[in-house]
Image: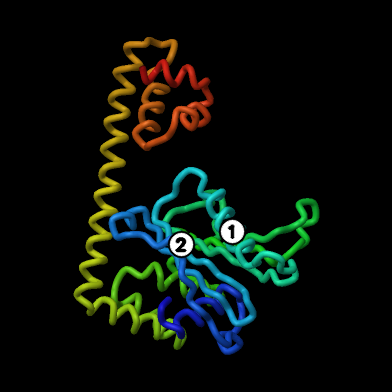
Amino acid sequence: MENPMVRKGFCAAILRVSPETVEKTELLPTHLQRSYADDKLGILDVRVRMLDGTQINMEMQVKGYEFWDERALFYLCKMFSDQLKSGESYENLKKCIHVSILDFIRFPKDKECYHRIGFCKRKTGKLYSDKLEIQILELKKLPKEIQTGEEIVNWMRFFNGKNKEEFEQMAKKSEYLGEAYEALQKLSADDLRRLEYEAREKALKDHNSFLSSAQRIGEKRGEKRGKKIGEEQGIELAKQVFRLQAQGKTEQNIASECDIPVEKVRKILA
């Protein structure tokens, strides 16, 4: 997204307009910058301001976690409210869009891979305001053959590319995707960038391995604890409690997910 032409093409797809109508995009600094070690959680944040003041915040996320929806709403609302300085009129507020590019499935019961979520009246579905919008791109739901003509789906296919042939095929779809492919090739040819990418990949694999190992250890501890406590608590319940603890969940979170009192959680973990 550092490339102005790539940014223009993707923002046009998000706004569902022709790229020719996008006069200018400005890349804003983001407060979500992170070190490579912390990038293992998959956060990549890009914030863009259009010529008319519209702001688009884009992020990539490889793994789902608790309170994902609340987090997205928080950053969307913060982006919206941060537009006004002290004493300024509400009429200066411009449209804000939060775009989540996900490598996990957020809506398992919905076959659609691209979602636009707005602020609507619940009974009629009528749009109340277009100033706030969330767009969710679920890459894992992309079908092998895409019939839709929506440009955003072409970008999703590009983001989900697995090999050179797929990238080259998508690059032929438009000059903006072609530019994105050229930018990607330049990054791939840069040794420093390649090493940074490999460091992120290693951190992500280490993180996932740690989670899997912690969950297995938690299940074994839960099974032993469940047998010791007896049928009153239940082995499966104890395993679930220890598994959630291994994921870093608090006692309150565990109690809520298991639908048991906090006191019972403490008794199992004791």
Q: Residues within 10 Å of mark 1 (few under 14, many from 20)?
A: few
Left or right relative to 29: residue 206 = left
**Residue plotted at (80% across, 56% down):** 124
Q: Position of residue 198 (x, y in %)?
A: 23, 63
Q: Residues within 10 Å of mark 2 (few under 14, many from 20)?
A: few
**Front-lying residue, 249 or 142:** 249
Above or below 8: residue 60: above
Looking at the rendering, which quadrant does residue 175 occupy?
Answer: bottom left
Amino acid at the residue labelled 1 = Lys
Looking at the rendering, which quadrant does residue 18 occupy?
Answer: bottom right
**In which quadrant of the rendered image does the C terminus lie?**
top left
**Front-lying residue, 97 or 236:** 97
Q: Which residue, given by chain and number where applicable, does mark 2 sit on?
A: 31
The tag earlier along the polypeptide, 2 or 1, is 2
**Residue plotted at (56% across, 63% down):** 98
**Residue plotted at (30% across, 47% down):** 208
Above or below 106: residue 245: above
Q: Secondary structure at mark 2?
A: loop
Left or right relative to 194: residue 130 = right
The image shows a total of numbered marks equal to: 2
Q: Secondary structure at mark 1?
A: helix
Residue 207 visible in rendering: yes
Q: Position of residue 258 (x, y in %)?
A: 49, 27
Q: How is the image coloured?
A: rainbow
**In which quadrant of the rendered image does the N terminus lie?**
bottom left
Looking at the rendering, which quadrant does residue 162 occupy?
Answer: bottom left
**Front-lying residue, 123 or 33:** 33
Separation (CA) of disc 2 from disc 1: 12 Å
Amino acid at the residue labelled 2 = His
| Residue lying at the far right of the rendered structure | 124
Q: Which residue, given by chain and number where applicable, does mark 1 sit on?
A: 78
Q: Position of residue 23 (x, y in %)?
A: 58, 87
